[in-house]
Image: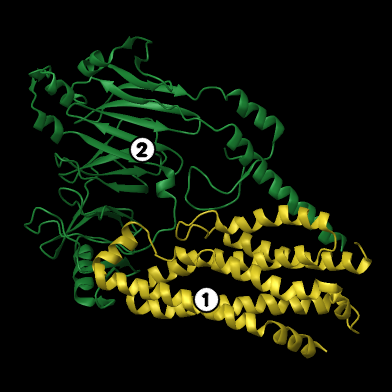
């Protein structure tokens, strides 16, 4: 049964995962190529001096991509389920409904985590040829809240879509948007080091929220 | 499911205590009316430059107001260009013959704030060549990092460690009694300055050193503290004033500010206390005096010290004005105010009621 749920999610989302991977690798490649181009045109010494002296990492184009991906994947995963209330079929499977919804949610979070980890790995592996480890780590520390923002945006979008009542959906939206914005308060490199544990806690909390929406759905709230 | 419902309510409350004060601040923006203050050596008092959204007023702490021309005359070492243009620059001041060049060479400006200091350090440093024989400073082909055993220079072009240079600089430091690892380090790697004072750094025994690169080789000296006993340094700054009289400024654990003279000695600057983590400092120095302004969370402190001996010649402490009505209303309406940005740090972190 569990494998069937995973397979269904794979069939439903594989096209979107492929598209997301393509866009992410495309943007990461663009960032790496533009860094390489800057190193060649401005000179390695000058580029390093700018990165160290002015604390510039040249990755800000990446900032909102995880957020957009998280929202899009949630829309692609959950909107078809809510059309004509197809999700009822999932809720009537002979397993606990929180488990089945939890597994579907896990598919999304795990998929996004793999996607973001691929981004970070490609970036770090390539950058280490051109940059010292301190700048590679700093790039990773700067991207981390953006990736967490993408995962939180996915959980919150799921929470909003699964909510059966429009009135409550609007309230959830009002609460959810600022929570996602918490991950994007500063573009200053490595400025989220103290905030990261709080964002991880927020991710865990927001990942539990869809359970309440689906509980209300099961109760028949309209 | 009840727990999740409570979690939803808690999240809504967090959003409310964060966004409502932010919205309130948008409607009733905070105004910072801290005046610019300079010490007048002729009047032996501080003169405030106060802007009232319309005109600039020049007032001393006794309440006496001056015209712009009078202020220029009272601050000849600050307004010298205006005085030269008007042909009013005095020939001498306290027996010192004045020339624009002399005044300019002895002008000194230093400013920093907790927000500039409280950030995640990069851990890479650029050591400029301080005696290249050229007028302009050039970027070196490498940067260095700190390790437990010494300094490690990384060649930018190859992104590999220059072992010979690393060993040479680490050995030279050790030869001068430096005990690794480095505790604090500060340097200004900008090439947009007249000369380079290298880095000030403290070792594991809390001794203060200066490191420069002279013709590609290390140049090290220990700063002589004299009779001053400093348990621990908490902040170092290098400075490069035009008169080359100073190497840097350092702050001790007990919040005392010291100047590192270019002869390698330490001199206490006679002000009450300066905590770099929570106070903003501005120093405007001239041939005769330094005007030191320190902004704390509760007051503004103005000091004038002698530019050579650093002995205090004047001091004014001005408590912050009472909170405006809009702020008092805010504190009543919104007793819990959550912020993630702070004027004291670049790091994002939750702060409650830290206005």
Identify residue for label 1: A24
For residue B247, say whether it is visible. yes
Residue B137: x %, y % from top left: 15, 56
Residue A97: x %, y % from top left: 87, 76
Mark 1 crowd level (few <14, some 14–19, many ≥20, 10 Å Cα): many
Q: Nearer the viewer, residue B302 or A34?
A: A34
Q: Quadrant of residue A127?
A: bottom left
Q: Quadrant of residue B307?
A: top left
Element carrying mark 2: loop
Image quadrant occupied by the N terminus of chain A:
bottom right
Give the foreground label among 1 and 2: 1
Residue B1: x %, y % from top left: 87, 64
Q: Which chain is indicated by disc 2?
A: B
Q: Residue at x 70, y 57 (%)?
A: A176
Tell me, what hue is chain B? green
Mark 2 crowd level (few <14, some 14–19, many ≥20, 10 Å Cα): some
Identify residue for label 2: B256
């Amino acid at each position: 049964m569990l494998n069937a749920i995973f397979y269904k999610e794979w069939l439903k989302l594989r096209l979107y995962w492929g598209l997301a991977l393509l866009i992410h690798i495309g943007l990461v490649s663009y960032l790496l190529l533009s860094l390489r181009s800057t190193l060649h045109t401005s000179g390695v010494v000058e580029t390093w001096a700018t990165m160290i002296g002015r604390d510039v990492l040249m990755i800000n184009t990446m900032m909102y991509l995880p957020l957009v991906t998280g929202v899009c994947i949630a829309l692609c995963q959950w909107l078809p389920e809510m059309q004509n209330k197809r999700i009822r079929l999932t809720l009537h499977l002979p397993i606990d409904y929180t488990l089945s919804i939890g597994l579907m949610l896990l598919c999304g979070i795990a998929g996004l985590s793999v996607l973001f980890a691929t981004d970070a790995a490609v970036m770090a592996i390539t950058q280490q040829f051109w940059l010292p480890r301190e700048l590679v780590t700093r790039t990773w520390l700067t991207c981390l809240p953006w990736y967490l923002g993408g995962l939180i945006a996915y959980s919150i979008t799921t929470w909003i879509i699964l909510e059966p009542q429009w009135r409550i959906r609007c309230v959830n939206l009002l609460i959810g948007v600022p929570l996602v914005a918490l991950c994007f308060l500063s573009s200053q490199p490595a400025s989220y080091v103290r905030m990261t544990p709080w964002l991880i806690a927020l991710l865990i909390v927001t990942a539990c929220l869809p359970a309440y929406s689906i509980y209300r759905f099961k109760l028949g709230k309209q | 499911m009840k727990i999740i419902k409570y979690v939803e309510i808690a999240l809504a409350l967090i959003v409310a205590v964060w966004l409502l004060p932010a919205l309130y601040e948008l409607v009733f923006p905070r105004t910072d009316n801290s005046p610019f203050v300079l010490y007048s050596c002729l009047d032996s008092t501080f003169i405030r430059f106060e802007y009232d959204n319309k005109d600039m007023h020049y007032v001393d702490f006794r309440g006496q107001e001056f015209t712009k021309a009078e202020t220029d005359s009272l601050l000849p070492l600050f307004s010298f260009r205006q005085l030269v243009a008007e042909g009013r620059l005095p020939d001498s001041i306290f027996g010192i013959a004045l020339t624009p060049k002399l005044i300019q060479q002895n002008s000194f400006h230093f400013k920093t704030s907790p927000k500039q200091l409280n950030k995640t350090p990069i851990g890479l440093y650029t050591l400029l060549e301080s005696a290249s024989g050229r007028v302009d400073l050039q970027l070196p082909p490498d940067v260095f990092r700190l390790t437990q055993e010494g300094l490690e220079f990384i060649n930018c072009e190859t992104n590999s460690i220059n072992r010979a240079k690393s060993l040479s600089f680490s050995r030279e430091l050790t030869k001068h009694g430096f005990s690794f690892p480095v505790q604090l380090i500060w340097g200004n790697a900008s090439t947009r300055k007249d000369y380079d004072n290298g880095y000030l750094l403290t070792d594991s025994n809390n001794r203060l050193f200066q490191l420069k690169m002279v013709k590609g080789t290390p140049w090290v000296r220990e700063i002589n503290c004299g009779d001053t006993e400093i348990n621990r340094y908490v902040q170092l700054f290098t400075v490069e004033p035009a008169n080359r009289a100073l190497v840097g400024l350092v702050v001790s654990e007990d919040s005392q500010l010291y100047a590192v003279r270019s002869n390698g000695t330490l001199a206490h600057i006679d002000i009450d206390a300066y905590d770099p983590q929570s106070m903003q400092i501005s120093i405007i120095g001239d041939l005769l005096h330094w005007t030191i302004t320190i902004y704390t969370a509760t007051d503004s402190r103005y000091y004038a010290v002698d530019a050579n001996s650093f002995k205090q010649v004047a001091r004014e402490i001005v408590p912050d004005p009472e909170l405006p009505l809009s702020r008092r209303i805010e504190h009543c309406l919104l007793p819990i105010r959550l912020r993630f940005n702070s004027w004291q740090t670049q790091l994002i972190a939750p702060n409650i009621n830290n206005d």
